[in-house]
Image (spheres, helix red, strand yellow):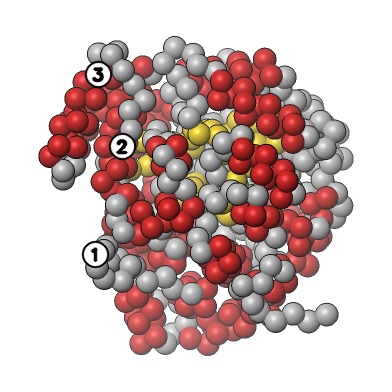
Amino acid sequence: MSYTYDPTSHCADEFINHQEILDTLAYADEHKNDLELIHRILKKCEPNLHPDKDHCSIITHREASVLLACDDPEVNKRIFDLARKIKLAYYGNRIVLFAPLYLSNYCINGCLYCPYHAINKTIPRVKLTQDQVRDEVIALQDMGHKRLAIEAGEDPIHNPIEYILDSIHTIYSVKHKNGAIRRVNVNIAATTVDEYRMLKEAEIGTYILFQETYHKENYLQLHPWGPKHDYNWHTEAMDRAFQGGIDDLGLGVLFGLDGYRYEFAGLLMHAEHLEAVNGVGPHTISVPRVKPADDIDPTAFDNSLTDEMFLKIIALIRLAVPYTGMIISTRENQRVREAALQLGISQISGGSRTSVGGYTEEIRPTDTEQFDVSDQRTLDEVIRWLMECDHIPSFCTACYRAGRTGDRFMSFCKSGQILNYCHPNALMTLSEFLTDYASPETQELGWKMIERELGNIPDEQRRALCAERIGLIRTGQGNDFRF
Ligand code: SAM
């Protein structure tokens, strides 16, 4: 059966249309040396935050693919410069921190790249009890985390939706010393509208689901059996999540499974589809790359991409969807993360353990890890490093708690308003971290940064109120303030 490209369709074969991707790649090859066209496309990406004028133009998947195909060093330099400029214009120099929490590695799928696949008999199967969830959350709170992404394999017997909901409830209920988890994002397998509605009612933040690969034929081979084999069910999941009331949606591709040019075009088409049908694009885009893990050797997929190309993709995502947050995890090492942060990343994980029950162990356990962690620094070290690179670490969770989700968050971001709220919120949550969890070296750097950055809050009243609240946090007289 042949399908026609239609970004407004709810059928995966139409909004991620294979022929449209092939045509896009051919168009990109044809125009990759057309410098006049390329400069016209780049011009559209210039950030423009003046509320009376147009917002920063969004380039299409075709235009972005031309930029990806072009290997002119001058053009590449301009792409990287623009990405830095857009990141600063829309997101400032703040970086939001989170940690993954693995609940269960029971899984009935056969994903060839994931060590949790059902026929892996060497990996111990573990599922946290609610008491263990509580202990993990206390360990995470003691590190200073306020925002988690929960992860679980797909298994209706061991990890039914009730188990996920109980776990979310447990996570939100733990109040240990000054700690609290204020936002739980969820990364579980594609499910039904009813179950998405239950997640929404449980007050989750973002629903994250990686597409893994947009190439249907390859997808079917990489997921040879199990519920995840159903490409359309998986690819249409974000539409069902939106129908269930979740309007903060997180996309991602597992780079390395298929050719990066195909994945890049598919990812942007997915973002365009969400914008076309929901009036709001993805809240976040993640950029994981396949990593070695228990019985997984990434070279088996033969589609790995160089660090240089990986960074160019991050920069181009920043150009194409300037209002979408971008996430990089500890799959990447410090060097790659440092470069990526300049180019548009707005959220990173820190101090992560990718094994079930990993945070309560003294020594990093590796037997149930989902993938090898490249950046193994502690959260305190990550926070210090961010500040040394002049990024403000933020534990802010204000937007979603104030109902600024979906299109409300997007219009907030598009009009540049985000800077008036996020900056003071970042400083207040950083103060909490410094007061309650930081080492003396991190504290020293942090208080200096706060002093300096307070001066960048334009509104005088807000600046004074923010400084007053930071004083209260520092002297133990209050916390959890937000604008
Ligand atoms: N079971 C859910 C699903 O199927 O979407 C949750 C996913 S899993 C806990 C989180 C993500 O880890 C996967 O979507 C996949 O992209 C990524 N992942 C799996 N194996 C990986 C590997 N070897 N290296 C890097 N990332 C991997």
Q: Secondary structure at mark 3?
A: helix
Q: Secondary structure at mark 1?
A: loop
Residue 56 as seen in the image, left or right of residue 61? left
Alpha carbon separation for disc pair 1 and 2: 22 Å
Mark 1: C-beta under 8 Å from nearest atom of ligand 1: no
Residue 286 appears anywhere in the view? no
* Residue 323 x/y as whole percent: 41, 58
Contact? badges 1 and 2 (CB < 8 Å): no
Residue 5 as seen in the image, left or right of residue 417? right
Alpha carbon separation for disc pair 3 and 1: 35 Å
Say above or below: 274 vs 360: below
Q: Amino acid at mark 1?
A: His
Residue 196 as seen in the image, left or right of residue 273? right
Looking at marks 1 and 2 on the same chain, the residue that comes earlier in the sequence is marked by: 1
Q: Amino acid at mark 3?
A: Leu
Point 61% across, 34% down: residue: 202
Instruction: Tell me the quadrant of the picture where the N terminus can be found.
Output: bottom right
Q: Residue 50 got which mark?
A: 1
Say above or below: 130 vs 81: above
Looking at marks 3 and 1 on the same chain, the residue that comes earlier in the sequence is marked by: 1
Q: Residue 20 got which mark?
A: none
**Where is mark 3, residue-wise?**
472
Point 29% across, 25% down: residue: 431
Say above or below: 481 vs 29: above
Q: Amino acid at mark 2?
A: Phe
Which of pointers 2 and 3 indicates the residue nearer the eye?
2
Point 29% across, 43% down: residue: 421
Which of pointers 1 and 2 indicates the residue nearer the eye?
2
Q: Residues within 10 Å of mark 1 (few under 14, many from 20)?
A: few
**Where is mark 2, residue-wise?**
483
Alpha carbon separation for disc pair 2 and 3: 15 Å
